[in-house]
Image (cartoon, coloured by chain):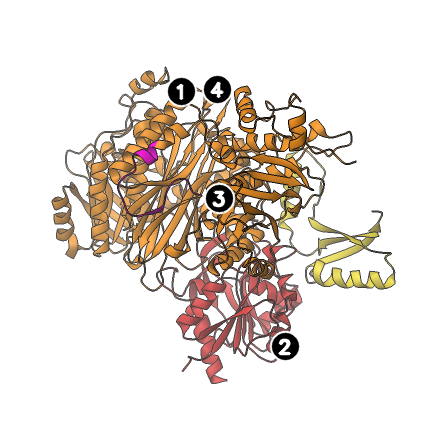
């Protein structure tokens, strides 16, 4: 079994009101020197077997069409130990 | 003249305004046909409405899961073939996720769900769904959404403007941070329209702020008769 | 590491095993009672079941002896199709239609986790309505928070509102009304009450009973997890070996999408005639559903707890029994219909599992992997719990409070002072516009909302062909109830009754949510018993039966209880919603009439609270006979099309009502007070049984003679002005007051956004 993590973030040019709200809250809670907060999503996917090339291609397909909306989001995939 | 036209209304798990869309079609004089998300068949309808609601709870992203429903396969084909499709609110989100319309809908800039009677200016009457309006006509219909901010890159926005594909714009108040105050857009052919506000809630003076919404439904019936 | 499960056999074999009954909230005598009922010590699972089902929240042990008055003093009426005792009452509204409605509380969870507490409150009340066989059609939210400018109110309020909106909007239920009240009395104990209305045809009514030996018990909806398990963790830690799981979460998290599917799936199986009995899972989850279904039916049920689908495989049987995971229902289905039932669940992608069957043994028997862990008489769990007769005593401060009236408070006398007072009142948090809150709720979904906030009642069309509809209002003035709980409850009833009638609907029935402090405090118990007595007496006099409701005790921090807050919901019927009476001024020239008598009554008033921070004296006189006469007049004139607008008078008196009527559609008004009138009393007194109406000049005589014939005092106040024009009040201390709509609108609309952003 293998574990893959897909991180999805809004593209830099897209307004992120949630990130802005969090940034404001961090300031009020006393964390100074914060210049930016962007809020995204993480998908943790457990798959049978190993993540070979074919599997990775499938996951990219999935990440680019379902897990993220390419019009407004970017994604990255990494494998981690379960 | 317009009776006998079959307008499909799709129900996804979590669709909420399907019943209201059905009522609006009926009041406009058409025959409403209920379409089930899991049924890959449009049952010979002449046009389709993707209604408002929270399909799949708005989980993942609004409309992101619904766009892969079996009914969407024949629907995308029909849209490409010129069938009139109206996506209202969640329906607009599904159309963008399906790439039948450009851009995307994101969280309201003020982060709250907002329900208000919204003034709009109708800017294009060249679509199947807005032919009965006058250009620059001002209407008031309910708006209710949490993720209604229309976004697209500058190039796309400029193209929409240049090609007269902005169907309606917000007036007085921009309720959700939509770029260029865009409330609704259409595709190049003018058969697919996405609209954030809810015309189906402005078809009876008893329950709506006006009956301005009826025009969207009578337009498609007239468009179909004239095709 | 497998854990040994405490079985019935074990319990019989070691009668003296120590059990943590006290940690689970049971008193020693209650624990003894359980041992006597069973003839042995209870198993841990049985102990868990009794502890939760005999808790105050589930058993109503402190309130039962008082609540029986609602049945004892029930008015004679044929409209009750289902009375108190079921999940919700059902009322006949004519033409074969029935309506079910109920209000409930989710106070403590909302203080802990505002969003989820409020969201799951909506979820719970909607399932109660659904389990009667009705389609839920609307919700309302009576809310009470601490001081508006307190930092903790800033923490709680936005989350509560977002939770109610987030859950209700996703379910597709319009929010048609409610209340928002700020008072420091609620600072540590906000009140989040939720009301749901459902409609059905008479033949669709279903009850929570398990009849038919051999019928199957099906659990469907969300999978069961560790939500809401509080003290039961004690059992888990008692018997677990080292390395057991961490403490379970006590906050319940709602999934409105799941509940939407549950609604559609349930309505489909009900309409297909596939269900014999149905129950929703609320407080005490499976323990409650199984014991109640079994008690109400043949009396026996056999359950295989390991058949319950789990989100978390490490849950112990005790935890499964106590779990308060949301969005679950329990149905009783005949063997012949089970395949069809499961097929519909599959269509909606709703998990469904047969977990047991109805038996004739008269016992509720629960097995875990073949071993019996529960074997009890179900009635003893669900219905025959302890009944307390808690001591009650009129508080020693009550007399001093009553004696300290408002007559010495400085009053505005000049026109300028009155003008300032109007603006101060209009902008005060309780009277200010609630738009910031109500615009977060969908009012349009389902397309049948005829009236919604800020109108006097929420009104929905039930029949699209005939126009038949229902109207609901919830009200309670906690300050009045503090001054006099008996009359305070009657005043709450009177206000809700009046609000329903103002919109043109005939009041029919009542629900209530009784929010009080600790029942262990004799002063609180006195307030509770007085309020229940007042409400029961009031309902008898008005002829509107109590159909059901909820009690929330323990709303107090330390020794300070909240104001006694008996929220009353009144439901009324209107034969044609097209004839409803809205509250806004509309046509210039319409004559403005005040119905009812105004007295100098300011104790407990909004003015005394806002301007002087004063609470003391006796609340305004309540006169239910006068309310009935006024209500009948409003419904009659409304139905005949004589009224162009109507608004009841309550907090803030005439001034507030006029401002609200003017701002509703942006239409001004010119009022002339009668010569020799005390302007302050006329404008701000909160005397009851009053309403302001507008009629076209052609209908003035009709309205005045109808009022005279009914014995209702009528005062001609003035006329509606043009759209956009000012509100003018003449004859105030020989002068005149003019307020522009812009000024009034700014004052009213700015308050909440400034506080909550």
| Structural distance between the alpha carbons of marks 2 and 1 | 72 Å
* Label 3 sits on residue: C298
Q: Identify the magenta region.
A: C69-86
* Label 2 sits on residue: B77
| Structural distance between the alpha carbons of marks 3 and 2 | 57 Å
Mark 1 chain: C
Which chain has been coloured orange in this picture?
C
Mark 2 chain: B
Instruction: Give the secondary structure at mark 3.
Output: loop
- Above or below, C747 against B109 in this view is above
Instruction: Give the secondary structure at mark 4.
Output: loop
Image quadrant where residue C537 sits: top left
Image quadrant where residue C533 sits: top left
Pointers 1 and 4 in contact (C-beta within 8 Å):
no
Considering depth in this image, is A21 or C272 the residue closer to the camera? C272
Chain A: drawing colour? yellow
| Structural distance between the alpha carbons of marks 3 and 4 | 46 Å
Pointers 2 and 1 in contact (C-beta within 8 Å):
no
Which residue is at 70% across, 48% downward?
A: A38
Numbered tag placed on residue C559 in the rendering: 4
Which chain has been coloured red in this picture?
B
Q: Position of residue C242 (x, y in %)?
A: 78, 29
* Label 1 sits on residue: C523
Which residue is at 69% across, 56% downward?
A: A13
Residue C593 visible from this viewpoint: yes
Question: Per the image, is C84 magenta?
Answer: yes
| Structural distance between the alpha carbons of marks 1 and 4 | 11 Å
Pointers 3 and 1 in contact (C-beta within 8 Å):
no
Pointers 3 and 2 in contact (C-beta within 8 Å):
no
Q: Main secondary structure of the magenta part?
A: loop
């Amino acid at each position: 079994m293998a574990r893959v993590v897909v991180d999805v973030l809004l593209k830099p040019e897209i307004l992120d009101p949630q990130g802005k709200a969090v940034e404001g809250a961090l300031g009020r809670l006393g964390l100074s020197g914060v210049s930016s907060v962007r809020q995204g999503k993480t998908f943790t996917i457990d798959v049978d077997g190993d993540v070979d090339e074919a599997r990775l291609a499938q996951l990219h397909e999935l990440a680019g069409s379902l897990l993220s909306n390419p019009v407004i989001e970017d994604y990255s995939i990494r494998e981690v130990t379960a | 003249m317009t009776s006998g036209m079959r307008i499909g209304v799709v129900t996804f798990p979590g669709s909420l305004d399907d019943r209201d869309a059905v009522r609006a079609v009926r009041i406009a004089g058409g025959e409403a046909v209920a379409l089930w998300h899991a049924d890959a068949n449009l049952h010979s309808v002449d046009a389709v409405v993707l209604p408002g609601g929270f399909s799949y709870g708005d989980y993942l992203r609004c409309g992101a899961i619904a766009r892969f429903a079996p009914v969407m396969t024949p629907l995308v084909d029909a849209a490409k073939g010129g069938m009139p499709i109206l996506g209202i609110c969640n329906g607009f989100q599904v159309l963008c996720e399906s790439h039948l319309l450009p851009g995307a809908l994101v969280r309201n800039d003020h982060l709250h769900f907002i329900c208000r009677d919204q003034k709009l200016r109708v800017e294009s009457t060249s679509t199947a769904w807005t032919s009965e309006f006058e250009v620059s006509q001002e209407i008031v219909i309910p708006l209710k959404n949490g993720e209604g901010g229309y976004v697209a890159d500058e190039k796309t926005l400029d193209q929409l403007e240049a090609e007269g594909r902005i169907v309606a714009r917000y007036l007085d108040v921009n309720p959700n941070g939509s770029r260029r105050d865009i409330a609704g857009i259409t595709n190049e052919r003018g058969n697919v329209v996405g609209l954030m506000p809810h015309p189906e809630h402005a078809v009876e003076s008893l329950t709506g702020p006006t009956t301005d919404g009826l025009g969207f439904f009578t337009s498609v019936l007239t468009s179909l008769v004239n095709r | 590491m497998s854990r040994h499960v405490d079985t019935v056999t074990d319990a019989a074999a070691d009668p003296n095993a120590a059990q943590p009954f006290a940690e689970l909230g049971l008193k020693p005598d209650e624990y003894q009672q359980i041992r006597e009922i069973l003839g042995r010590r209870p198993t841990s699972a049985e102990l868990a079941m009794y502890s939760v089902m005999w808790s105050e929240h589930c058993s109503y042990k402190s309130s039962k002896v008082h609540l029986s008055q609602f049945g004892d003093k029930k008015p004679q009426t044929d409209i009750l199709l289902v009375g108190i005792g079921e999940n919700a009452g059902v009322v006949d509204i004519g033409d074969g239609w029935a309506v079910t409605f109920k209000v409930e509380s989710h106070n403590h969870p909302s203080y802990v986790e505002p969003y989820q507490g409020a969201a799951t409150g909506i979820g719970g009340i909607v399932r109660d309505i659904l389990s009667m066989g009705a389609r839920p059609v609307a919700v309302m939210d009576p809310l009470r928070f601490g001081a508006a400018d307190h930092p903790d109110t800033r923490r709680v309020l936005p989350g509560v509102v977002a939770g109610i909106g987030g859950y209700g909007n996703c379910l597709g239920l319009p929010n048609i009304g409610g209340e928002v009240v700020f008072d420091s009395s609620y600072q540590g104990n906000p009140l989040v009450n939720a009301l749901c209305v459902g409609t059905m045809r008479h033949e669709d009514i279903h009850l929570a009973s398990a009849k038919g030996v051999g019928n199957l018990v099906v659990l469907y909806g969300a999978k069961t997890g560790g939500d809401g398990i509080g003290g039961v963790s004690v059992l888990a830690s008692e018997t677990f070996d080292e390395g057991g799981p961490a403490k379970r979460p006590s906050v319940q998290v709602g999934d409105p999408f799941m509940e939407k599917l549950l609604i559609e799936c349930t309505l489909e199986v009900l309409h297909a005639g596939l269900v014999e009995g149905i129950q929703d899972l609320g407080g005490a989850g499976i323990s409650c559903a199984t014991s109640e279904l079994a008690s109400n039916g043949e009396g026996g049920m056999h359950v295989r707890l390991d058949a319950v689908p789990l989100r978390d495989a490490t849950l112990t049987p005790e935890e499964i029994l106590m779990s308060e995971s949301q969005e679950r229902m329990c149905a009783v289905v005949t063997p012949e219909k089970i395949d069809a039932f499961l097929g519909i669940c599959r269509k909606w992608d709703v998990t469904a599992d047969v977990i047991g069957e109805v038996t004739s043994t008269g016992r509720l028997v629960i097995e875990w992997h073949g071993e019996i862990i529960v074997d009890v008489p179900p009635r003893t769990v669900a219905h025959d719990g302890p009944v307390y007769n808690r001591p009650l005593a009129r508080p020693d401060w009550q007399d001093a409070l009553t004696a300290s009236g408002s007559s010495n408070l400085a009053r505005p006398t000049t026109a300028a002072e009155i003008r300032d007072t109007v603006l101060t009142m209009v902008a005060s948090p309780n009277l200010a516009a609630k738009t910031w809150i109500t615009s977060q709720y969908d009012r349009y979904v389902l397309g049948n909302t005829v009236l919604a906030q800020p109108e006097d009642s929420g009104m929905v069309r039930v029949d699209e062909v005939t126009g038949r509809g229902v109207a609901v209002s919830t009200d309670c003035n906690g300050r009045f109830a503090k001054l006099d709980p008996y009359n305070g409850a009657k005043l709450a009833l009177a206000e809700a009754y009046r609000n329903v009638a103002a919109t043109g609907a005939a009041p029919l029935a009542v629900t209530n949510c009784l929010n009080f402090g600790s029942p262990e405090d004799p002063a609180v118990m006195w307030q509770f018993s007085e309020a229940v007595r007042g409400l029961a007496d009031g309902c008898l006099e008005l002829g509107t039966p109590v159909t059901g409701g909820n009690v929330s005790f323990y709303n107090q921090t330390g020794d300070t209880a909240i104001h006694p807050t008996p929220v009353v919901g009144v439901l009324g019927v209107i034969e044609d919603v097209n004839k409803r009476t809205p509250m806004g001024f509309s046509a210039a020239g319409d004559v403005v009439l005040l119905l009812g008598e105004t007295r100098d009554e300011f104790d407990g008033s909004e003015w005394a609270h806002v301007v002087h921070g004063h609470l003391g004296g006796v609340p305004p006189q309540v006169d239910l006979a006068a309310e009935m006469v006024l209500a009948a007049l409003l419904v009659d004139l409304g139905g005949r099309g004589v009224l162009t607008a109507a608004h009841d008078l309550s907090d803030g008196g005439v001034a507030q009502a006029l401002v609200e009527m003017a701002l509703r559609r942006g239409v001004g008004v010119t009022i002339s007070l009668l010569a020799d009138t005390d302007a302050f009393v006329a404008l701000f007194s909160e005397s009851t049984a009053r309403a302001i109406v507008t009629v076209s000049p052609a209908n003035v005589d009709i309205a005045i003679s109808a009022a005279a014939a009914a014995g209702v005092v009528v005062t001609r106040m003035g006329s509606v002005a043009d759209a956009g024009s000012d509100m003018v009040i003449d004859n105030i201390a020989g002068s005149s007051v003019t307020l522009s709509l812009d000024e009034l609108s700014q004052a009213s609309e700015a308050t909440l956004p400034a506080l909550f952003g």
